[in-house]
Image (cartoon, grey):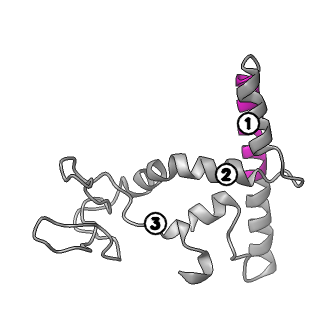
Amino acid sequence: DIGDIIRGRDLYLGYDDEEKVRRKNLDNNLRRIFRNIYDNLINDLRNEHTKKEDAEKRYNDDKDKNYYQLREDWWTANRETVWKAITCGVKSGNNYFRATCGDNGEGKTGTKAKNNCRCKEKNGKDDADQVPTYFDYVPQFLR
């Protein structure tokens, strides 16, 4: 899924040579994008030496320059926004395929995400603003 692709953990490498080339190009583009994010981060922190050193230590230990830790942190910070962007055009009546939302107020747990494929917040006050699943943190081969 998209989380695995962004984080560089996608196990699916393609079923034919053409798809394998596309996957390799995608991975190269993601490396370039995260290298730019890293370079911009380090540039922004140039006057804050302690934070800069911490960022360099956290993100620059990858020999192949894949920026896996930066990808992981980016996904953690942006997964909800990505889900909202993906589901913003969902037609009314469409449901997420698994019952992953919490209590619906009737004591029933595990309800389907009905509002733009999103769950209500835990306290129920705001309308449908939660990513309905954490499958992106389950290893891909177990899904």
Q: Residue at x 73, y 78 (%)?
A: 14
Q: Please check the rendered image and state whether residue 68 is part of the magenta-colored stretch, yes or no.
A: no
Q: Secondary structure at mark 2?
A: helix
Could you say which is closer to the camera, residue 73 or residue 29? 73
Q: Position of residue 128 (x, y in %)?
A: 26, 54
Residue designated by label 2 = 71
Q: Is residue 143 left or right of residue 99?
A: right
Q: Which mark is residue 134?
A: 3
Q: Is residue 55 above or below residue 80?
A: above
What amino acid is labelled 3 in the image?
Tyr
Q: Are marks 2 and 1 in contact (CB under 8 Å)?
A: no
* Other-residue count near label 3 (Cα within 10 Å), few / some / many at <14 / 14–19 / ≥20: few
User: Is residue 13 in sight in this rendering?
Assistant: yes
Q: Closer to us: mark 2 or mark 1?
A: 1
Q: Is residue 76 above or below residue 41?
A: below
Magenta span: chief secondary structure: helix
Q: Secondary structure at mark 3?
A: loop
Q: Is residue 77 above or below residue 111?
A: above
Q: Residue furthest left?
A: 106
- Which of the 4 image quarters holds residue 87? bottom left
Q: Position of residue 133 (x, y in %)?
A: 41, 67
Q: Residue at x 39, y 59 (%)?
A: 131
